[in-house]
Amino acid sequence: MIYRTALASRGQITLPKEIREKFGIKEGDQIHFVVTGDTIRLKVVPRMGIEELFERLPGAEVPYPGAEKERAVMRARHLKRREKR
């Protein structure tokens, strides 16, 4: 199927709703433009969840502890910095 859209004055395009829904594209998603000769392909860059990002960190041998634990660690670091002042 072929979809058509127009280029706006600021160089923006709108992806048709059917395409956004089919590929699960949401506001803020990154899209790569792959140029081969005179062809342009769009490639959606998948978002990684915090768990996947954590697992990719060097030395991350333990699973992601969860958002609540992460917040507790960040609060403790913040309080420690405040005490040093």
Image (tube, helix red, strand yellow):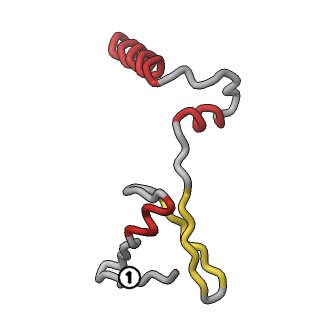
Query: How packed is label 1: few (under 14 Cα within 10 Å), some, or many (20 or more)?
Result: few
24 relative to 61, above or below:
below
**Residue at the outermost bottom position:** 38
Q: Quadrant of the C terminus?
A: top left
In the structure shown, which secondary structural element does the residue marked by tag 1 occupy?
Answer: loop
Residue 40 position, x and y percent, is 57, 80
Which residue is at the front of the view, 70 or 3? 3
The number of numbered badges drawn on the structure is 1
Residue type of the residue flagged with mark 1? Thr
Which residue is at the front of the view, 37 or 77? 37
Residue 55 position, x and y percent, is 64, 32
Q: Tell me the residue that label 1 is attached to.
A: 5
Which residue is at the front of the view, 78 or 13? 13
58 relative to 48, above or below:
above
Residue 5 position, x and y percent, is 38, 82
Residue depicted at 47% across the width and 57% down the height:
24
69 relative to 45, above or below:
above
- Side of 83 where 60 appears, left or right: right
Residue depicted at 31% across the width and 78% down the height:
10
